[in-house]
Each structure stands twice: as C-alpha cells, then as structure tokens.
Image: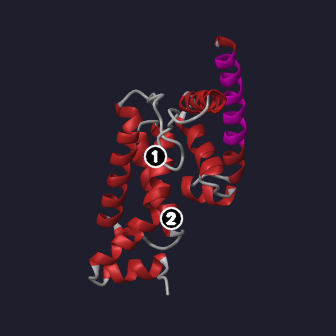
C-alpha cells in the first residue's frame, strides 16, 4: 500500500527521516519540470530542485496542512526559481541542443533524410516555444507552466500562488497572447 504525502510527513516528523525520500521520489520529476520551464537551463533546474527538497525537509514542521503538500512544495520551488531569476537578471536562455520531455537526446544519424527534416522542424518549433516562454515575465510564465505542462487546475494554481482564480486565468490568457505574438515574430525572423 502506498503511503499518502500526509502519512510520509507524519512518519518523517516522528523521526523516520528516511521516509522523506519517498516524497522526493514522488515529487522530484514535477518539481524539476516546473523549474526547468521556469528557468530554461537544466543545471539551474537541478539546483532549484535540490534546494526545494532541502528547504522542504528543513521546514517540514512549519507545514500546517492547510493546503496540499504538493501546493506547499510548488510554492517553495517557485520562490527558489524567482530568487534565481532575480539573481541572473530575469531570463535564462535554453540551449538549442536539447533533450525532449522524456529526457532523450535527439538523434538524427540513423534517420532518413525526410525523418531528419521533420525532426529538425519539430526541434525548431520546440526551441521557438521555449524562447517565447522564457521571454514572458515570471508571473505569467509560472501560470502557463503549471497549467499547460504540469496540468494543474485553476484552483490548484490559485492555491499554490495564493492568488484568486480570476488572476490565474488573466495571467494565463495574457501570457498565451504574448507567447503567440512572440512566436509570430520569431517565425517572421526565419
């Protein structure tokens, strides 16, 4: 039987500190994905992911259970992302030599010329979307990442960010409009 987040927290606080690793395994990938999309660089995302779990462990006694553990954890991760963005001037550029969302490097050597061309087009589109996302202000970027990539509901995003659902919707709508305009300008530059 799989333990719930709350059960793991209880056990960790009761002295079974090794059980915290279950929370890390459960939430590491989503936190890393959020961080990567917010920051645009793998090394920064790994650092923020690690910082998030260290902060969560150190502050676990402060978790009141008013919200879900995942909301609390996302909030810690977003705060760490914002700190890093402030420190580095707000925008990180992502390398064009990217892995896909499953962590696989793109390999074109064995592909036919047609398949290679299609892969290059997909890579180019993905790169353009990453650049458009990175160009957004962090408050819009985080809402888009949580909604479109993390597949969170408006209510969950509202809970994590501690803002009204209407503000979440507004930031999503405005952010998507700005991304669309940025993508059109990037396409025009090709």
Q: Give the structural element (helix, strand or loop) at label 1.
A: helix
16 relative to 56, above or below: below
Q: Identify which residue is drawn at 46% across, 63% down.
A: 27
Coordinates of residue 24 in the picture (x, y in percent):
39, 65
Front-most of residues 172 and 22: 22
Q: What stretch of residues is rendered in magenta?
A: 170-187
Please identify the quarter of the rendering in which residue 62 is found.
bottom left
Q: In this rendering, which labeled residue sits more in front, label 1 or label 2?
A: 1
Magenta run includes residue 109:
no
Instruction: Classify mark 2: helix, strand or loop.
Output: helix
Q: Which residue is mark 1?
A: 35
Q: Where is mark 2, residue-wise?
A: 70
Tell me how far mark 1 sits from mark 2, CA to CA.
14 Å
Out of 135 and 102, give the one closest to the viewer.
102
Q: Quadrant of the C terminus?
A: top right
> What is the magenta segment's predominant secondary structure?
helix
Residue 171 on the magenta span: yes
Residue drawn at (51%, 37%) of the image: 106
Crowd rating for badge 2 (residues with CA inside 10 Å; few <14, some 14–19, many 20+): some
Q: Residue at position x 36%, y 30% from top?
A: 88
């Amino acid at each position: 039987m799989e333990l719930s987040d709350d059960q793991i927290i209880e056990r960790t606080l009761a002295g079974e500190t090794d059980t915290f690793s279950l929370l890390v395994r459960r939430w590491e990938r989503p936190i890393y994905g959020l961080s990567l999309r917010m920051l645009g660089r793998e090394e920064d995302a790994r650092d923020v992911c690690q910082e998030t779990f260290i902060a969560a462990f150190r502050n676990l006694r402060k978790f009141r259970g008013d919200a879900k553990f995942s909301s609390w954890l996302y909030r810690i991760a977003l705060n760490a992302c914002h700190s890093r963005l402030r420190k580095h001037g707000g925008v990180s550029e992502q390398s064009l030599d990217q892995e896909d969302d499953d962590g696989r490097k793109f390999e074109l050597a064995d592909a036919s010329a047609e398949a290679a061309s299609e892969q290059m087009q997909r890579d180019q589109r993905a790169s353009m979307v990453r650049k458009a996302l990175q160009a957004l202000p962090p408050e819009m970027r985080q809402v888009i990442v949580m909604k479109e990539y993390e597949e969170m509901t408006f209510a969950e995003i509202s809970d994590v960010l501690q803002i009204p659902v209407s503000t979440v919707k507004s930031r999503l709508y405005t952010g998507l409009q700005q991304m669309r305009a940025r993508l059109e300008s990037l396409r025009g530059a090709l």
